[in-house]
Image (cartoon, rainbow, N blue to C red):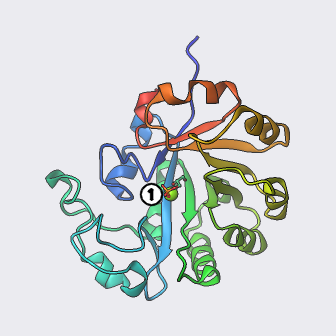
Amino acid sequence: MKKEYKTTAHRGVSRLAPENTMAAFKLAKEHGSQWIEIDVQLSADGVPMVIHDNTVNRCTNGRGKVGEMSLSQLKILDAGGWFDDTFVGERIPTLRETLLYVKEAGIYLNIELKVYPEDNVFALCDKVKEVIEESGIVLSQILFSSFDSQALYQMKRTLPLVRRGQLWQKIPDDASQILNNIDAYSVHCDYRFLVKQEAKWIKEAGYQLYCYTPNFPELVEKHWQWGVDMMITDDPKAYA
Ligand code: G3P
Ligand code: MG
């Protein structure tokens, strides 16, 4: 029997559609992903927006810092044309719009809390919590992830029923203590640096283990054997 490999569509199916747009999210299910990963940060007027970089320069037709632009300034930008003309008209989604889509589609959402050096972690967490509660989404449909342990700790305090995943490029020496502090559900690490021994202790300690962002299945054949539970990839169909 063919083994089923679990995937998360990284920024949506970002190999085939502009990252972090509704067009990329809508492809996830038909490409075999039950999960979508998105990056969230605040607009200048405190609205959680779905965009990866701290500027709009790479993924829209505008220029400027996300945190210095209002919702209305961000919403007039085109977030699809940079990728391909067929996507002209895509907008930067809000977290609220994304949650409503996920709710309707019956899939799962990994909300990466993006914390850039100038950002206020507490404001981000408060606004994200507010939008999640207003959306009425079932809390088991979502998971927080972040490189910033403080953001995850804050979410544990204010929205404890949403699971938390710690993002690391390399697993640090004090990983166990950090995971304990945030009462983590999962560890998300860069597939290029994970080694067998680390996978072993993480699984033995009872955590889910995810790897980002292998876009070719042959790169992670051994990772599945080490017990990795899911790949966060731009190209989920490659694993189908
Ligand atoms: O969730 C994994 C991955 O999204 C982390 O890195 O930079 O793609 O947000 P980045
Ligand atoms: Mg991300």
What percent of the width, then of the height, locates residue 88? 18, 60
Q: Is residue 84 left or right of residue 210?
A: left
Residue 18: image quadrant is: bottom left
Q: Residue at x 64, y 54 (%)?
A: 168
Determine the residue located farthest toward the left in the rendered image: 85
Q: Indicate whether 234 appears above or below 48.
A: above
Rendering coords of residue 85 (x, y %): 14, 54
**Relative to 174, does residue 196 appear above or below in the rendering?**
above
According to the image, label 1 marks what residue? 101
Q: Nearer the viewer, residue 63 or 97?
A: 63
Res 99 visible: no
Above or below for 115 versus 84: below
Q: Residue at x 82, y 42 (%)?
A: 206
* Amino acid type assigned to the residue bearing label 1 in the image: Tyr
**SS assignment at label 1:** helix
- The picture quadrant where one finds residue 53 is bottom left
Q: Nearer the viewer, residue 139 or 209?
A: 209
Residue 134 seen in the figure: yes
Residue 213: % across, % down: 50, 44
